[in-house]
Amino acid sequence: MSRTYPWKLLAGLALLLAVTALLSLGVGHTAIPLHELWAAATGHGDPLIRLVLWEIRLPRLLLGLLVGGSLGLAGAAMQGLMRNPLVEPGLLGVSAGAGLGAVAVFYSGLSAAFPFAMPLGGMTGALVAVLLVCALAGRDGSIHNLILAGVTVTSICGALTSLVLNFSHNPYAGMEIVFWLLGSLADRPLDHVQLATPLIAAGCVLLLGSGNALRALSLGEETAHSLGFRVGRVRLQIIAGSALAVGAAVSITGCIGFIGLMVPHLLRPWVKGDPGHLLPVSALGGALLLLWADLLVRLLPTGQELKVGVVTALVGAPIFLGILVRTRRLYY
């Protein structure tokens, strides 16, 4: 493991993220030059550009930063906890559970009566899904049991989500299904961002605080226990952090997969396999990758804008397959 904190890598990712953020504010159906963006941000310039900036582009950018960062961070923490590069929040049922919780709250009418009901519903669904996966996988947490349990819980949550929407009298139920299945950063108002931010931040704090414990766990549970870490408490901290961060994120944007799988895998060699250093690096990398995917869906010359979850799945599925093939070669 690397003993030197990767300041240069963090600085490089932060700089690249800042440039990408400026591009995200300026790119869309109509490009906005940098000087006009600055004028709109300071309350001057064209009123229409100010409206586009504050009501459309800025919420989309903030969601990309929050959701991508939380997915990358949760994926790195879960991979460190399970000591397996094939684990990610979506694989463990977090996204599907959060989607089910948010949809159930939405169609029960609680979201209209209580503004925090939707992210709380997503958080609760994610937490229940992860706990159920861990219980089904057993104490050994083998990769076969883990994947099987994750696929089972994800399928159940997906079926229940479809069932809830099928019984709804809302004529836009089909559109809501597409929203949860594909995920998108578009058309989310700023108050939704403000609603999810405290929960995502709380989850990220829990996950970032697990770095030293993950280093110890990489040497085995017995070694971690001898170093003073309570494995059960660490597991609960990471599960709760992932449920808070990813559950609140998915309750706003819908299910966006493979970010938590791809980013830690791509950045792990840059931190020499250190699971503690990988956490903040994956947070920046996840935000960067999701913003790139969102820029791509806006720049592609399609008649209708693609959902960003489609792009991340198209890129992430081959990477997942490559990791799986390489992992099999280690055992055969």
Image (cartoon, helix red, strand yellow):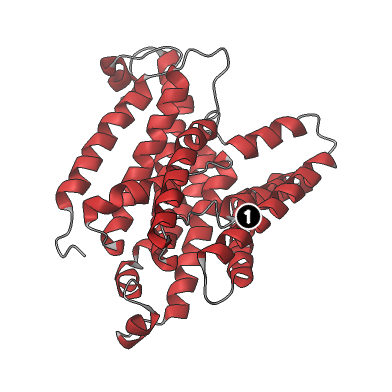
Q: Nearer the viewer, residue 324 or 54?
A: 324
Q: Residue at horizontal 56%, vertical 63%?
A: 144
Apparent side of residue 6 relative to residue 64 in the rendered image (left or right)? left
- Disc 1 residue crowd, few under 14, some 14–19, many 20+, Cα 10 Å: some
Please state which amino acid type lies under the numbered disc 1: Val
- Image-quadrant location for residue 38: top left
Q: Can residue 147 be seen in this view?
A: yes
Q: Residue at x 19, y 47 (%)?
A: 9
Which of these two is toward me, 120 or 144? 144
Residue underneath mark 1: 151
Q: Nearer the viewer, residue 199 or 303?
A: 303
Q: Position of residue 278 (x, y in %)?
A: 30, 56
Residue at 45%, 70% in the rendered image: 237
Q: Position of residue 327 (x, y in %)?
A: 41, 56
Whether residue 201 is visible to the viewer of this picture, yes or no, is no
Where is 315 relative to 11, above or below? above
